[in-house]
Amino acid sequence: MNFSVIIPAHNEEANIEKVINSLENNVVGEYEIVVIDDHCADKTADIVRGLAIKYKNIRLVENNDEPGFANALKAGFNNIKSEIVIPVMADLCDDPKTINQMYKLALEGFDIVCGSRYMKEGRKIGGPSFKTFFSRFVGLSLNFFIGIPTHDISNSFKLYKKKVLENIKMESGGFEISAEIPLRAYFLGFKITEIPTTWFDRKEGESKFNLFKQGFGYLKLYLWAIGQNLCRH
């Protein structure tokens, strides 16, 4: 088993089969797909069970903690069978072809490989303009102020080596966990890089991300990172 792809899913019956088929058609190598049933009330879990008959590398696990992206992500991290893991969103926003290049960089020694929408050749297609401004500002400013080697800290599409996850304490309760992990890893000295990727806004289903609800978590992390950087100089 070379790596694991985890897909946190909450009521994604309109997208989950397309996401899995896209992974199977574009990702090379020996890998597993772990779908996390984040308290789904639709047919998401049934669809995954059906696909697991066709694709033998698929497993379905449940988020037995409180519902939400962070807990679903942790449930996935706790159920992988490899030393490398890549979260992929269930809404078709991530480009699966990027995974092949992420894995190559992991083999070269990087502990975290960030899919970046805001570096050269990266793209973000669609989505609310204010959300784009917010994520771009956070990513570019943290790259400038603290030197973290990614321009897109908030993107959830990242590769992690398991040893990173085992050495940090994840405290976030929302989508900001995708920024927390690389920030904490950066100050612990783990090796981080980025790779351009294309992000697509969802076409079906409802987004679970609410900037006004999640914004405080990102602000708290942002200020923490600035403070950590000041303390080490």
Image (tube, grey):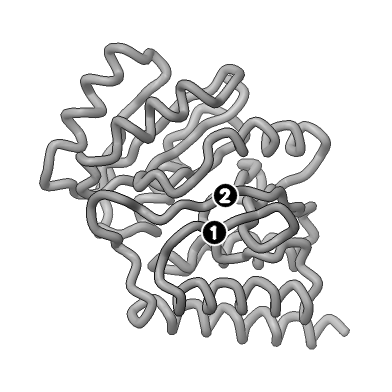
From the viewer's perspective, tell me whether residue 90 is left or right of residue 157.
left
Give me the residue at 77% from left, 44% from top. 110
Height in image: 204 above or below 62? below
Q: Which residue occupies the extreme right position in the image?
A: 233
**Residue depicted at 77% across the width and 81% down the height:** 145
Residue 20, located in which quarter of the rendered image? Answer: top left
Position of residue 221 in the picture relative to residue 15 (left or right): right
> In the image shown, does 51 or 171 lie closer to the viewer?
51
Q: Residues within 10 Å of mark 2 (few under 14, many from 20)?
A: some
Please count the marks in the image.
Answer: 2
The CA span between labels 1 and 2 is 6 Å
Name the residue beneath numbered marker 2.
Answer: 198
Q: Which mark is residue 63?
A: none
Horizontal arrangement in the rendering, residue 73 relative to residue 183 (left or right)? left
Q: Is residue 24 above or below residue 146?
A: above
**Disc 1 vs disc 2: Cβ atoms closer than 8 Å?**
yes
Evaluate whether residue 20 shows in this view.
yes
The residue where tag 1 is placed is: 124
Q: Secondary structure at mark 1?
A: strand
Q: Earlier in the sequence, mark 1 or mark 2?
A: 1
| Residue pictured at 65% horizontal, 42% vertical | 161
